[in-house]
Image: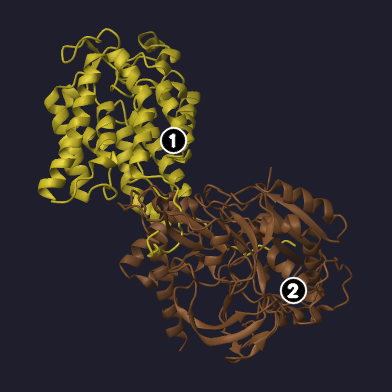
Amino acid sequence: MDSKLVVSPSPHVHSGESTSRLMFNVVLALMPAFAVSLYYFGVGALIVTLLSVLSCVLFEYLIQKFILKVQPTITDGSAIVTGLLLAFNVPSNLPWYIVVIGSLFAIGVAKMSFGGLGSNPFNPALAARVFMLISFPVQMTSWPLPIESRLKYIDAITGPTPLAILKEGLKKGDTISQIADQIPSHLQLFMGVMGGSLGEISALALLIGFAWLLYKKVITWHIPISIFTTIFVFTGILWLINPEQNADPIFHLVTGGVMIGAIYMATDYVTSPMHPKGMLIFGIGIGLLTVIIRVWGAYPEGVSFAILIMNAFVPLINRYVKPKRFGEEVKRNG
Amino acid sequence: MLKTFAKGGVHPPENKFSADRPIEVLPLPAKVSIPVSQHIGAPATIVVAKGDKVKVGQLIAQSAGFVSANIHSSVSGTVESVDPVLDSSGYKRQAVTIVVEGDEWEPTIDRSPELKRTIDADAQTIIKKIAEAGIVGLGGATFPSHVKLSVPTGKKADVLIINGVECEPYLTSDHRLMLEKGHELMVGIQLLMRALGVDKAMIGIENNKPDAIKYLSDISKDYQGISVHALKVKYPQGGEKQLIKALINREVPSGGLPIDIGAVVHNVGTAFAVYEAVQKNKPLFERVVTVTGKNLAKPSNFLVRIGTPVTDLIAAAGGLPDDTAKVVNGGPMMGKAVTDISVPVTKGTSGIIVFPANESRRKADSVCIRCAKCVTACPMGLEPYLLIRMSQRMMFDKMEHERVLDCMECGSCSFECPANLPLLDYIRLGKSEVNKIIRARKN
């Protein structure tokens, strides 16, 4: 033994958890959804996902190495997660250059310009998605049909998403029962047989990933469950009031970006509150905004906007919603 | 469902390798160095001089104030020097070094092994004897026990809580003591109950020690007012405030003491020392120490005379493994890394842990990803991620407002942090600066 001992302050043991392990578990949790996407959207899903992940990692590396001149931290896995989530939030027939531009926006603008991992106020993948939606509205809202588009990329056969069918139908003055036959059954929606962004379609696959994240203690239940509950209750009330003008709550939960948004985007560590109480407020806010945009807004889908708006409230929530300190209230009951 | 404290907490790997090893009496060392500052409070005043002959149990340093403790010789022999000696704090501090000659005890000490159950002493006598015996909190905090037992006027204790939690990983000294000295422990608890004037005592033990829970539950039937409670395993349940919360669901107010809510907490080791002091007239000069480590040949529990060099303990446990790079005095979560293994065992030494090189150095830290694991882990409901930022920016007045002084330095935040941030290091810095601010305000 060397005569010199290591002397450091306590604690002398560590959980062994690390940023890259947490990110790796998020990637694992997204794999069922990716498998479903490959099954339904085939080639397009593969191309868009690989391209998005590669360009996010590459942009992070280049920006850190040549612009910020710091040691690149791509091994922490956060750029891989951003790349995956970005791909999961776009249609599988999105042209390659839009994917690359979106990745550059996510990493360059939404993440690095705010100081990189840990400092960005908005979820990078979602900020990029909204940027792409505004810049390329046509390409970002043409949805390949599942299964039929398996062997196709930009030439995929497209069709509307269930939420778009609903919005259009109601605008024309149709009732829910008149629209119903154009929309897949609840079970099909739950499995993911519908048009939509490439990773958002299968509620089942996304929920399997949720279970993994909870089991691995990567996230807590607070944000996803408060979002689900709020959407369920809010749309449930509307549905009970007028079932011919409002879709049922289950439909709202299994369509669009609710599952991927609530489980994987709203729970982004950096852009969500630090305490359970704050997380619940954050989740309820996202749920309310989502339903308001879906039911009364111009867009058929509102999860991305809802999360980004609530991201902006996070510093405020952290400042005013404090955990209950130990010994704050004096209890004496003996 | 088993009880535990509500807020925060972590689950470090237990690694209690020495749990099955009975307590062995460590052979007498050749020489002991007994520091005069082994407790919280004023260092004791030395009452012997170089060349003096001393016996086992003889007073060698006198308590220097109300919050202070007597110190006794743990061996018989000749005082070699009264000089500063390197101790586990990393500093050289005043100590009495004695060369061991034979093992001659003070004749007043009752060395018979019989259990003495009958309690003759009244409350005042018990407290006096505890003070004379130099008993301090043996769980590691080393707060003088007689001070805790002197309830301030206007306050009243209604329950005595005995800490048999031993929530620190690796350590097993309290576990073994509960198994091997159960009856002595029970009498010690009854002495403490009488000293406090309470008729109820609760022993809290974590569920990873089912043998101790069963044994003490069985024998507690013979002792009026003592009950044993199994607790769910969760660090830091051995923290006073957490243990009180777990057992009787009361919260010690911020900045307050357990007595404010009617509770007094003592460690099982302390209760045993109280038994020996009052019933056997034996001052505190030896204690049970766990010597352990993943690569140590023979993890053990030793009964050790205070002042014995740690080197002797490690040698008796199979010798220092080649890959050792860190030696910790205490538990892995709150213990102190020593600068040299020759430092003496003191009253607060609950264990010695030998860490291999690959577990001795911290991993490089990265940026905070705001995962909130530190907030979830903090048993005091603080926000370590915020405190480290404030400390780094020297915003100490804000840290006071964020109640940084509630931090008991359990280390749960640093343990959990996936970015390996030195959260507790910066919180400690903040605490010391806040204390300076408060002192300046008073003057």
Colour of chain A, in one word, is: yellow
Packing grade of label 1 (10 A; few <14, some 14-19, many >=20) is many
Colour of chain B, in one word, is: brown
Q: Quadrant of residue B126?
A: bottom right
- On whether disc 1 and disc 2 are found on a single subunit, the reply is no
User: Which quadrant would the C terminus of chain A be assigned to in this image?
Assistant: bottom right
Residue B413 locus on image (x, y percent): 45, 55
Can see residue A241? yes
Tell me what residue is drawn at x 31 percent, y 13 percent: A40
Tell me what residue is drawn at x 17 percent, y 43 percent: A109
Q: Secondary structure at mark 2?
A: loop
Q: Chain of mark 2?
A: B
Taking the view exactly as shown, the residue that stands out farthest to the front is B102
Q: Quadrant of residue B64?
A: bottom right
Label 1–label 2 contact, CB within 8 A: no
Residue B165 locus on image (x, y percent): 65, 56
Query: Which residue is disc 2 drawn over?
Result: B156
Residue A65 locus on image (x, y percent): 13, 46
Tell me what residue is drawn at x 41 percent, y 55 percent: B360
Q: Chain of mark 1?
A: A
Q: Which amino acid type is shown beneath numbered disc 1?
A: Pro
Can see residue A246? no
Query: Which residue is disc 1 drawn over?
Result: A224
Viewer-side residue, A264 vs A58: A58
Q: Secondary structure at mark 1?
A: helix
